[in-house]
Each structure stands twice: as structure tokens, then as C-alpha cells.
Amino acid sequence: MKKYSLSFLFVIFVTLVSAQQKEMDKVARAAEAFRLAMIDPDANKLSLLITDSLSYGHSGGHIDHKQEFIDKLVSGKSDFVQINISHQQIQVYKKTAILRHDLEATTNDNGKPGTVKLSVLQVWVKENGQWKLAARQAVHPS
């Protein structure tokens, strides 16, 4: 009887780990779609990837809401030419995911070339079966 109980518990554990990994993969795909949408901004694509109540924190302290964030990207006020992500970690808790990564980017904000290196925390939530960015905070790495 104990042999069957342990086997059953093992099957449940493997099933839960597999489901967790699938959600982590979905979050990673949403984050990649978001990265690409920031490089080649389209208001509709961006809108589908973020919540209506987005809180987008910049490393300088300014916080954008959804429309301000989208407008800055589409207008070129905030222009990412290239974004490289490294050291990405994702944790999923039911319908919420925490994503951390390092970001190095080439920018051209308002036509002024530059580079940026940041450590980023993102909070993703699952809305109607889709992972959407709800909050983001960047800091300059120490």
C-alpha cells in the first residue's frame, strides 16, 4: 500500500511541476513579445500585452500609466533600438508571476543615441487566459 501511495504522490508532484513549467514558459513568451513590441512599437500590440492599470516604473523614479507608456514608445520619445535580456528568472503564483532580469539596451530617445543597463522587476498577471504586464520597476545595478 505504501508503494502505491508514494507512486501516487510522485505522479501528483510531477504533474504540478509540469504545469508550473508550462505557465513559466507562457510568461517568458509574453515577456519576449513585450520586448519585441518595445523595439518595434505598435499601440495595439502593446495594449494587448499590458493591463489597463499598468504601473511602469523608470529607473529615474518616474512612473508611467498605460497610455503614457504606449504614447512615449509610439512617438519615439522613448525609443529602444535594441534590447538584450539576461539572467531572467520567473516565479509563478497562481495567476501572478514575478519576472526579474538584467537589461542592456541601445536607445535613441527623441533622436538622441544612448545606452542603458538596468535591473528590472516585472509583475505579470493572468487576465482572461493571457499573461499581461501589470507592473515594472527598473533600477541601475550597483
Image (spheres, rainbow, N blue to C red):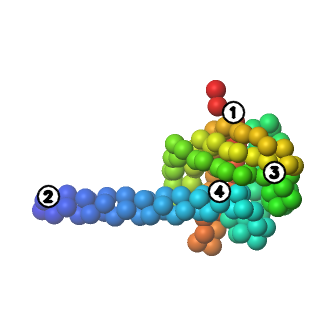
Q: CA distance from mark 2 to mark 1?
A: 53 Å
The amino acid beneath tag 1 is His
Closer to the camera: disc 3 or disc 2?
A: 3
Q: Are marks 1 and 4 in contact (CB under 8 Å)?
A: no
Closer to the camera: disc 4 or disc 2?
A: 4
Q: CA distance from mark 1 to mark 4?
A: 19 Å
The residue beneath circle 2 is 2
The amino acid beneath tag 2 is Lys
The residue beneath circle 3 is 78
User: Does residue 61 appear in the picture of this structure?
Assistant: yes
The residue beneath circle 1 is 140
- Sequence-wise, the earlier of marks 3 and 2 is 2
The residue at 51%/46% (across/down) is: 89
User: Observer-nearest residue: 72 or 105?
Assistant: 105
The residue at 58%/72% (across/down) is: 129
The residue beneath circle 4 is 35
Q: CA distance from mark 3 to mark 2?
A: 61 Å
